[in-house]
Image (tube, rainbow, N blue to C red):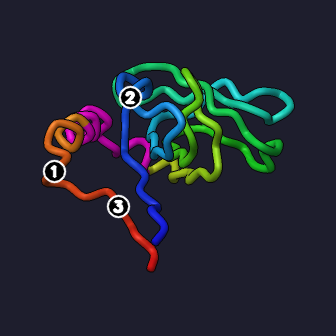
Amino acid sequence: MEDFSRHRINGALLPNYNGKQVCLLGKAKDVDPNGMFFTLVTSDDQEIRVNMAEPLSEYVAGLTEVHGTVQGKSISCENFVLFSEEASEKFDMGLYNQAVQLMERCGEHYSQQVIAQ
């Protein structure tokens, strides 16, 4: 059986997940001119570098969810989801951050795993 778990984290939790698969949500900014990285401002206002395996082929800005592997103080991006401008404006980042913290504190009550058989 393969474990496809991806914990939702914020910037403060990054060191706890070094080398692990995570899901990090924030607002993208400062895209590298060559498209090889960008900065994600997390729900707890930390700036995390997101490294791409290949140059970006689209404009990245606003609310963005990154799936990848934590590598020190950055994330090696495997996939990302861009949300619409409307969703970015309406999203309550503070409430989301509280939810992430609650999931971390009460992990035994919240499963973040998908196991393939």
| Crowd tier of the residue under label 1, counting other residues whose Cα lies within 10 Å: few below 14, some 14–19, many 20 or above | few
Left/right placement of residue 51 relative to residue 29 reads right
Q: Earlier in the sequence, mark 3 or mark 2?
A: 2
**Tag on residue 16?**
2
Q: Secondary structure at mark 3?
A: loop
Residue stretch rendered in magenta on the structure: 87-100
Contact (Cβ within 8 Å) of mark 3 with mark 2: no
Residue 88 included in the magenta stretch of the image: yes
Q: Quadrant of residue 117?
A: bottom left
Residue drawn at 71 percent across, 29 percent down: 31
Residue drawn at 23 percent across, 38 percent down: 104
Q: Earlier in the sequence, mark 2 or mark 1?
A: 2
Mark 2: amino acid? Asn
Q: Position of residue 72 (x, y in %)?
A: 56, 23
Contact (Cβ within 8 Å) of mark 3 with mark 1: no
Reading the image, the residue beneath label 1 is 108
Reading the image, the residue beneath label 3 is 113
**Tag on residue 95?**
none
Between residue 22 and residue 43, name the one nearer to us: 22
Mark 3: amino acid? Gln
Q: Rounded to the nearest whole Å, what is the CA distance between mark 2 and mark 1?
A: 17 Å
| Crowd tier of the residue under label 3, counting other residues whose Cα lies within 10 Å: few below 14, some 14–19, many 20 or above | few
Q: Rounded to the nearest whole Å, what is the CA distance between mark 3 and mark 1?
A: 12 Å
Q: Is residue 69 above or below residue 82?
A: above
